Image: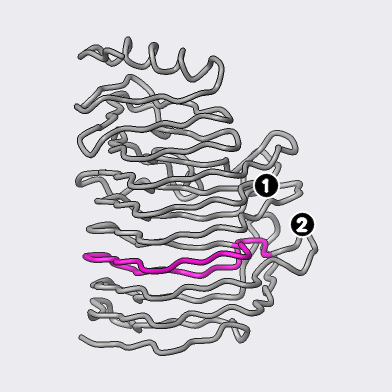
Amino acid sequence: MILGADPVENHRVLQKILSGTPGELDIPAGSHPLSDGLRVPAGWTIRGTADTWLTVVERTGHPVLHVLGSDVSISDLGLRPAPSDPGEHGGDRGTGLTVGEYLYAEAPEWISGVRVSRVRVDHGVLRTANAVGLMGAVRDVVLEDVTVTGGYTGLAVHWGAVGDDVSTLVGPTYHPHDLVVSGLRVADAIEGFYLSSVHDVRVTGALLTGVEMGFRLLPGDNTDRFVKYPDIGARIEIADVDVRWSGPLYAVRIAGWGRSEIDGAVTVLNYRDTVIRDCRLRGRGTGGSWSPILIEQAPGVTLEDITVSS
């Protein structure tokens, strides 16, 4: 495959391939400009090299790679999103890589069997968009050795729902699960990662440096009000995480309560079999009221071997 300096032509060539019969796509070394992000349907294997970069140059707000189908493998790629400011509820936009979506017009099919290895996302000085998003109807996903520079949240794992926006959700909601994340590296971002209204998730061996917040465990704005089944909030493990932080609030936030943007109702998620262990929090808050660990109505979460130092 030959990619040149024309971002429109590069996008046309790659999207045409990805819109055809699923197979393997090998992207050569080099920095390849794109006029827009690429949609990745089911069944594709996309590989680069240690020197392969895809750079979106137009401010469309789309992810560089948007995985919209199951059984996808992505490895050895560098991704540079165009500058964007998707706002508080645009966590799946402006990213290097998004699997799934936040809001759906109708009930979606679950995306499963996605494998991501040795992917690099570079936001540069941008601090307004996330780097990697796992959103909505997503399950059975493995992320290994993902490296993030800059951006807002390095890895955002968030529930999704049917509805036009967060104030008019009609449900049902979809909660990412059966996720394994290992070797995550995030530097110079606002936040390392967060998990919002998930279950059966394991995050291990993360290094989060130069961040304002290390990580958050959250129940979601509506916790489980649209989908009532006992798994949400269960069997979550965060282990062996090194946080080096300096910010106004906290290194780690663990919350069980959420306030709906539909009607302001407050609900509390009951965590079960959830543990945060073997974590090292190094740094000091910069605001008037700060804490290394902030816990809010989350009695079902166990903390083990957490060390704090300045």
> Nearest the camera: 254 or 168?
254
Quadrant that contains the C terminus:
bottom left
Image position of 76 (left or right of 5):
right
Q: Give how far across and how far down residue 263 sits, in percent.
A: 70, 59
Image mark count: 2
Q: Give how far across and how far down residue 99 sits, in percent.
A: 52, 42
Task: Estimate the spatial distance between the alpha carbons at disc 1 and disc 2, rounded to whole Å.
Answer: 9 Å
Question: Which residue in the structure is indicated by mark 2?
Answer: 226
Q: Residue at x 23, y 39 (%)?
A: 50
Q: Residue at x 55, y 58 (%)?
A: 179
Image position of 22 (left or right of 123):
right
- In the depicted structure, whether residue 253 falls above or below residue 201: below
Residue at disc 1, secondary structure: strand
Q: Magenta segment, principal secondary structure? A: strand
- In the depicted structure, whether residue 71 falls above or below residue 134: above
- In the depicted structure, whether residue 291 falls above or below residue 176: below
Q: Give how far across and how far down residue 249 sits, in percent.
A: 34, 75
Mark 1 nearby-residue class (10 Å; few <14, some 14–19, many ≥20): many
Bounds of the magenta segment: 197-223
Quadrant that contains the N terminus:
top left
The image quadrant of residue 116 is top left
Question: Which residue in the structure is indicated by mark 1?
Answer: 161
Q: Residue at x 31, y 32 (%)?
A: 48
Image position of 104 (left or right of 229):
left
Q: Give how far across and how far down residue 220 sits, in percent.
A: 60, 62
> Would residue 48 be counted in the magenta stretch?
no
Q: Residue most toward the right?
A: 228
**Contact (CB < 8 A) between labels 1 and 2?**
yes
Residue type marked 1? Ala
Residue type marked 2? Phe
